Image (tube, helix red, strand yellow):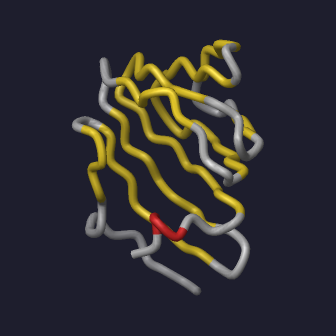
Amino acid sequence: MFTKKNEEGYKTPIDGISFKTLAYGEKTLLAEFKLEKGRILPEHEHPHEQTGYLVSGKIRLTIADKAHEVNPGDSWSIPGGVSHKADIIEDSVAIEVFSPVREDYLP
């Protein structure tokens, strides 16, 4: 699969938090998240392993009750089934990979 950059296809599951699936294969899915300052991604968990990289902005990522200040260039990996949330401190962009593929994120 190959895709070119474009501004179409973003979904907004929570006001101020949008995402777009960039590419996916048999075992992984790559997504871009746009996060507005002051928003909160509520605590949740899912069976997918989630590995991410902060492109721009600043967030506070809480994984299994441990908070991390995340700045551009920082990365993380959250095992499946582990509770996590994010407080958006500045307008931010994050890239994340999910495995296995999140069916609910397929275009």
Q: Which residue lies furthest to the left in this view?
A: 15
Residue 53, quarter of the rendered image: top right
Q: In the image, residue 38 lies at what x, y percent?
A: 30, 18
Q: Is 102 situated left or right of 37 in this image? A: right
Q: Nearer the viewer, residue 42 or 57?
A: 42
Q: In the image, residue 9 lies at what x, y percent?
A: 29, 68
Residue depicted at x 46% and y 65%: 105
Q: Nearer the viewer, residue 97 or 106?
A: 106
Q: How many numbered discs sit on the rendered protein?
A: 0
The quarter of the rendered structure image containing the N terminus is bottom right
Residue depicted at x 71% and y 61%: 99
Q: Which of 101 and 95 is in front in this view?
A: 101
Residue depicted at x 43% and y 28%: 42
Q: In the image, residue 2 lies at what x, y percent?
A: 55, 84
Residue depicted at x 70% and y 65%: 100
Q: Nearer the viewer, residue 83 or 57?
A: 83
Q: In the image, residue 50 lies at what x, y percent?
A: 67, 48
Is residue 27 shown above or below 46? below
Is residue 37 shown above or below 49? above
The quarter of the rendered structure image containing the C terminus is bottom left
Residue 71, quarter of the rendered image: top right
